[in-house]
Image (cartoon, helix red, strand yellow):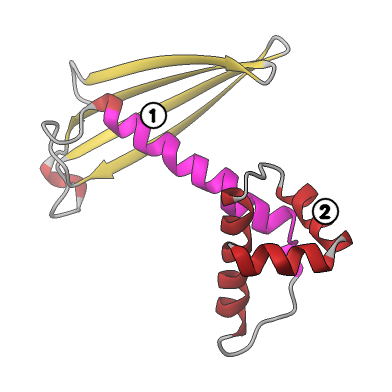
Amino acid sequence: MEQDPRGSQSTERGHGRRVTRTIKVTDAPAWIGFAQAAQIAQLRRTVTRHGKKSVEVVYLITSLPHTSAAPAVLAAWTQGHWSIENKLHWVRDVTYDEDRSQVRTAHAPHVMASLRNTAIGLLRLAGWSNIAAALRHHARQPPETVTWLLTC
């Protein structure tokens, strides 16, 4: 990073851990190799859980200038991305065990992913935060589930 980078820092506590996110942003240098790059950023996540500290560092490149994407905004966007990862992709990977799916030909994988996303979205709209519990609930009560789907 260049000298005097712009930055921001935030700390959260919850789920038995403390997470400090620090972002440093600077204008993209000409040698970066991306014609539209306006800024580069270093995002450092320091997680302390049960007295043990772990540090993860990621780098970002954006075409937005600092007037459109200040450091705090870039940090929020990055965290929003992980929210999607945790609420959708993780559910598909773990709850639906998508990685072991044997549906692999033609359009079937895309169709199944769309159906899973639709199911997750409908369950979230209905107020379920635990998708596995929602699936178990609806599997035990098929007539209620069909009625619920027809009235969504």
Q: Which residue is mark 1?
A: 43
Q: Is residue 79 magenta?
A: yes
> Disc count in the image?
2
Give amino acid for label 2: His
Residue at (70% x, 9% y) in the render: 51
- The span from disc 2 to disc 1 (Cα, nearest Å) is 40 Å
Residue at (44% x, 43% y) in the render: 81
Q: Is residue 97 magenta?
A: yes
Report the residue that reaches farthest toward the bottom: 106
Classify residue 35 as left or right of residue 53: left
The segment highlighted magenta reads 73-100
Q: On screen, 104 above or below 121? A: below
User: Secondary structure beneath disc 1?
Assistant: strand
Q: Quadrant of the N terminus?
A: top left
Q: On screen, 82 above or below 35? A: above
Q: Which residue is mark 2?
A: 137
